[in-house]
Image (cartoon, rainbow, N blue to C red):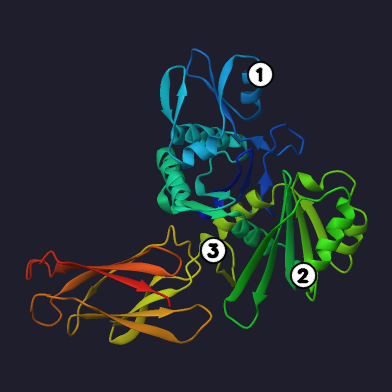
Amino acid sequence: MQDNSKGVYFGIELRDTYTCVSYYQINMESPETISTVMGSENFQIPTYIAKRRGVGQWYFGNEAKTQVKLGAAIGVDDLLGKAFADEEVLIENERLNARDLLLIFVKKLLSMPGYFYANSHLNKLVIAVERLNVDIVKTFSYVASELGVARESLMVIDFKEAFYYYALNQRPEYFLHDVVMFDYTEGKLMHYYLSRNLRTTPQIVYLQDAVHNSLGAQPDLEFDELIDRVFAGKIISAVYLLGDGFDGDWLKVSLKKLCHNRKVFAGKDMYSRGACYAGAVKDGAKDWPFIYIGDNELKMNLSIKVIDNRVMDYLTLLDAGQSWYEAYGECEVILDGNGEIEVWIQKPENRDAKVEILELTDLPERDNRTTRLRISAKPVSDIEAVVTISDLGFGEIVPSSGKVWEHHIALR
């Protein structure tokens, strides 16, 4: 068995234009972000690859751009968009799948920090993108599979979730009250607002987001007015400023307001570092008294009622807070009684549960407790799941009928 305390968590922030890579081990105080220039804080790697003319050599990042400018290589524009759309790219009369080109890019990224983690294994690869959908998850599942990364070692999250993990891994006094991040990257200004329900166990975390107009001729005063709108009636413990839009010395009046009775931090690698924390939390390597119910997370717990050692219990198939793109639950049970399975559906913030009875229509008549069933649950959205029940028979005593029942479960 691998010792996860000695393994590495990789966090990759992937944008259309640039990428950041961080890594983390449990014995480190916090994740480290890899600079493309030793000793500098040049963390942004262009999301770009290029093929050397006439040979099968590939460049990535700034080197790829340089080689294209020199005329020595052919570059691939819009790498992420083409990979997510599963397009082909024509290079020197050869058609290449864009997903395979993204695979080359990710492989190059993971080779960069090799000297940082010699003799360590990969615990989790966590990729953060601005928005998630099924095609994006499928793309990274393919890339991870080709890299030899096990399914359970891959996480794909959005920037909101990366910020959630980053903010709540800071010192507790920084999230004593609410927390805000302003992301001003490449002319796009938005904010995330994080709050917690302190009355639940675990604490339920809420993240609101909003996109704003780019700042105009008087950015300091315009940002100052935006702060008033976002903070109105709220108590904020910490503020994070992310992105190249905050470069320069234009933050004067607004910065003074931000710093009044709260901590303010600036950086450009918070998503990739948050992704590292996400991997460690999901591995159980860090205490985590929170649950986040975001756009991509399941909004329900799904359980079945079972009897284990003569004690009635509830066996959880799906947990609220899991990414619905990746969640899956399965178990095997022996049917005791008639051909029905009780499924319990519960919101995480509510003690009450809705019970649905799943009927096993036309199940062959057998002696009691001589039918073994495999029950699996797979979400199809954040509030819906398909429960599949298969008749396995009972070893050599009772052959399987081959029957399979599918039931759609929804949180209403």
Q: Is residue 257 visible?
A: yes
Q: Quadrant of the C terminus?
A: bottom left
Q: Is residue 169 visible?
A: no
Mark 2 neighbour class, 10 Å CA radius: few under 14, some 14 to 19, many 20 or more: few
Say if 131 sits above or below 355 in the image.
Answer: above
In the picture, measured across the screen, residue 53 lies left or right of residue 198, that is: left
The residue that mark 2 highlights is 173
The quadrant in which residue 38 appears is top right
The picture places residue 97, in percent across and down from the top left corner, at 42, 31
Residue that appears at 64% across and 38% down: 17
Look at label 3 and name its amino acid: Asp
- Mark 1 or mark 3, earlier in chain: 1
Label 2 to label 3, Cα distance in Å? 27 Å
Look at label 2 and name its amino acid: Glu
Q: Do the CB atoms of the residues marked 1 and 2 lie less than 8 Å apart?
A: no
Q: Nearer the viewer, mark 1 or mark 2?
A: 1
- Mark 1 or mark 2, earlier in chain: 1
Residue that appears at 56% across and 35% down: 78
The picture places residue 65, in percent across and down from the top left corner, at 64, 24
Q: Which mark is residue 69?
A: 1
Q: Do the CB atoms of the residues marked 2 and 3 lie less than 8 Å apart?
A: no
Residue that appears at 46% across and 33% down: 98
Mark 3 neighbour class, 10 Å CA radius: few under 14, some 14 to 19, many 20 or more: some
Mark 3 secondary-structure assignment: loop
In the picture, measured across the screen, residue 380 lies left or right of residue 292, that is: left
Report the number of discs.
3
